[in-house]
Image (cartoon, coloured by chain):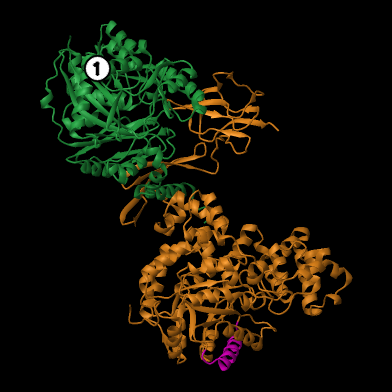
Chain colours: A green, B orange
Amino acid sequence: MKKIKKVLIANRGVPAFRVIHTCRDNKIETTAVYSTPDRLATHVFLADNAIHIGEAPPIESYLNKERIINAAFKSKSDAIHPGWGFLAENHEFAQMVIDAGLTWIGPAPETIRLMGDKIQAKNIAVKAGVPVIPGINGIKHENEILDWMKKEKVKYPIILKASKGGGGKGMVKVNSSKELSGAISQAASEAKKAFGDDELLAEKYIEYGRHIEVQIVADKFENYIHLFERECTLQRRNQKIIEEAPSPSISKDLRKEICEKALDLMRAIKYESAGTVEFLFDPSEKKFYFLEVNTRLQVEHGITELITGLDIVRIMLDVAQGKKIGITQPEVIPNRWALEARINAEDPKTFNPSFGRISRLQIIQAHSVRISQGVYEGAEVPPYYDSLIMLVMTSGPTRQDAIAAMDRTLSRNLRIEGIKTLTPLLLSLIRHKSFQAGDFSTRFIEQHIDELVSGFDEISVDDELLKISQYVAEISALGPQEWM
Amino acid sequence: MSGFDFVTPQMTPKEIIKKVRELNGVIFTSTGMRDAGQSDFKNRLRLYDLLTLTRYYRHMGLFSAECHGGARWHVGVMNRKESPFEEIETLRKKMPNVLLQTLVRETNLWGYRPYPKNIIEYAVQKVDIDIWRCFSFLNDIRNMKTLAEVVMKRGRLFEPAISFTQAEWTTNNYYLKLVKEIVDLCAGTNEIILCIKDMAGVGSPKRIYSLIDAIKQKYPDLVIQYHRHATDGLALPAILSAAKAGVKILDAQEDSLTRFYGQAPYLALQAYLEESDIPVHFNRDAGEKAAEKVRSWIGDYKWAESPFKGFDHTVINHRMPGGAFPSSFEQAEKGGFLQHMPAILKVMSLYNKIIKYFDVTPGSQITWVTCSGIVNSYAKEMGNTGVQHIITLLTKLVIEKKLKFEAMDKQEQEELLTLFNNAPGDFKNLIMGHYGRLPMSWPDDWVYQSAFKDEWKIKIKKRKEISPLESIPADNINKLKNKLMGIINREPTEAEFILYLMHPNDAVNMIEFREKYGETPLVLPTSVWRNGLKNPGDKVEFEHWGMPYCIELLSIGEESDGIIHVVMRINNKTRVFAVETPRAKKIETRMARKSNEIGSPIDGTVWRIGNPSRGTLHEGDIIHKGEEICNLEAMKMENAVTAAFNGKIKEICINLNDTVKENQLLFVIEKEN
């Protein structure tokens, strides 16, 4: 495998930010790609050069495979890193990259294809001795679901997912038979749009489940190493917003078991590069079920890096260049607790997206804080893409210390104006008694939303100053007012 | 505490009254924080500036500081955007040893209409005031009952006031009858102060002496306070004769705040009284310092001073109260009829002989609106000749014919019967007894004929003889609170709710103002509050919530498309503010408002109009309840918009791929009947 000289990052925002930095650490040049509304975006200016690849709709730009490969040639890049989202789990694209003579930084196209098909993935898991949730595959009609539920005595709620999907898109929870047909068409349509395929699967929905995943790295020399687990239980609309490592909900023995099972599965598919095995953990029965394999770098990989001290993107680059992973399993020793909060551009009460210009962005980074920033002050958050604008990670010797560092960072040290963000909700979450006690489920946010909203800080000193300044600006420009 | 402390808020009313009775000489109530500003500066004196006086008030040896009530309340909400609640809270903190005093309009409290008993009880419970001066523009003592009960039960000092004017019918006997009613209402003289409220400043020294002397002879233990405006130019001699007759407490204000319509200047008054051998309990040093302090900021209020300058001895005829002068002239200026002011004042002096009550809120407003209305309508129709004509007509009725309507010519009678045709609703309420009983008698029948035309006889029958406390049905407090909650979208504070009870619209405006501009009214110096920053480099520094702040102006841009860009350094960080001018082009986004209009549930882009099974929908298509009619996408999540009822699409207000705002109008539907 040849040495990589220049990487094109087929992504934008936070993932592009992340990959570019490791490339720079390793003296590898980078190329950014951008759509028309992203012409002045953060990632464009972090790279060594940038190439326009199309208009705003993702399908014309960040999902446009040919344009991206052409951009790689044009920029003399010899490798492509897909980041996460967009084409990261698109095996056709991975194959196109390889066929074009470029290096694909990620698992083999065949692995992506195999694991992208949820039905096959589940079968493989069963064969590898990994427990799975009861479910049915390849649904085209409502009746197939009804028959399956009858046969396997599955009760509502169930969840519909895109067979090719991941990341919450194309996932719809169904509470009763009344909702079923509407849910199928919604899930199919979202699946088609996000992944280009409308095939669905249905599964039993575990109500108070917790979401635990194991980070794996592997090379071409059959070295399979786990970097321990992450807990990603706190979600809204099936998308994670707070993650932590290690998981506060499993014992030492269970940790060992879950990590071993994940390795078993990855060995069975001869996985290469970085990937994640996701499990749903049922705390009442202390059982975990295989959910899926994410054949890519994940948003929350940073907290694993914080607890292990490793650079997962660096490992991906090494593996892609045919190098061995320079570390053995016993050398992976987690020595702290890490927490991640996703700053999404969303209304913290309704989760409606909030886009527009960020008129002010300030974040004070004191000790134990790591930030991945997909935007800058003055940047425009366009309505076309994912709402993630920034990742805030904190760490400390204990969970409590990591939470304290997160609290200080998200409260007075963070200031974002011009758009709404999830920050008030994130703060309210980490201050919640149940969160601090480690007692929560994937439904925690929907169940406690009113309580969480009531915990939002109403006014800050900065808000107040801005209001006063607005007044001074208006009166300075307009003079004394009639109402005075 | 200070060596000059005379009474403190911790004392009971009984203890306070005992102290005053034992006082050798007199003591002052400072009106510097309320009536002084109301009478000469349209109530615009801001808490920001008044707070500079508290360090002196603490040592001044005042009986009390009047700092609340009257029109200051309403103007605070409406113009200064200061809440009377935060005012007393702050003053209490800054001068904890000084008694705080309010002025209330019996059943009208701090508003302009009579409130039901339960609202009075509710509001009075929640206001932290030591001395409650209460007046009635009708001198209808019955109307004070609820207030007296709540205040006295709370252990606060009740100060009933009798409204004073100099007229042939306001005799000593008339007032003695009122004082008896008051003493009966308050179970004696041990826990109250009686106020003589000379709100127009018309009491001549002799008349005042005679009145107070008569009261003191009958009630030697009654503590009396004299409230007097300076309008006629005779405040000092009148106050001296009041003190000689036995008044113990006198209203006065900083000499440097004194113009024409407020109270007497306290330094001058002290010297004048002491020269007449009346001792004054007053720390002159603190008084001088406060008066000096006023000079450092009073220049910022030149714009608020009355355009009608100088003393006005004719006030004894027109009787406009000092507190109403600036606002009346302001209205006349704004309404473009300032030139008719002398005529209006003349009509007022005739009007108050036809309908007898006291020109003080809300009576003074009724007089003002009615009389200025009459003059303006004559002026509009016949110019100055018309104005002269109506004065002649009224003079004939009042002076020549001694109010005898029948003695007027037929034609004059007919004209008089149109006089109150267009009188304001409050005038009609007044003569219908909605505020209480008129002090002497109801007006003559022709006034009712003029106001109510054919219905006048029925109206007289329906006239109320009982107090509004008896006649007004209770309000549903929870319902009112919910209503406010619906307007401001959150639970109101108690203070906000009481503001709303008194002045619903202005309170909501103020709440919205404060939500938008925070505590701006409390932190900005007056020049910046009113004029902003003018030149590059100008800055304003202040402390707020324990932090230092600095706002510095860098530049103000040219207006372009109705927008002015203002660049400022906020705590050293450069920020650009886009300020919309009144000429700003408002890009109207149509919002869904009616029940047949479907709005967007989110901010997003329209990626499908219609649904997969039916395809694209068009205007005129029939839609069914629950059917998806369009789909919005925002950050890759789909959001179906469904029809809430059966109907026909009347209008599709969006195009495919439009970016829409939350609640933006998507469809207009013709509902199926």
Reply yes or no: does residue B208 show up in magenta: yes
The tally of labels here is 1
Label 1: chain letter: A
| Residue reaching furthest to the right | B410
Q: Position of residue B564 (x, y in %)?
A: 47, 41
Query: Considering only vertical position in the picture, is B359 above or below A299?
Result: below
Q: Quadrant of the N terminus of chain B?
A: bottom left
Kindly indicate the quadrant of the structure image that contains residue B427.
bottom right
Magenta region, residue range: B203-221
Q: Quadrant of the C terminus of chain B?
A: top right
Task: Give the SS element for disc 1.
Answer: loop
Q: Position of residue B580 (x, y in %)?
A: 50, 42
Q: Position of residue B68 (x, y in %)?
A: 49, 69
Query: Considering only vertical position in the picture, is B537 above or below A68?
Result: below
Q: In this rendering, would B545 be left or right of B368?
A: left
Reply yes or no: does residue A249 show up in magenta: no
Q: Majority secondary structure of the magenta segment?
A: helix
What residue sits right under mark 1 in the picture?
Answer: A128
Of residues B20 and B29, the one drawn nearer to the viewer in this rendering: B20
Please state which amino acid type lies under the numbered disc 1: Ala
**Badge 1: how crowded within 10 Å, few (<14), some, or many (20+)?**
some
**Residue A411 visible to the viewer:** no
Query: Considering only vertical position in the picture, is B297 above or below A77?
Result: below
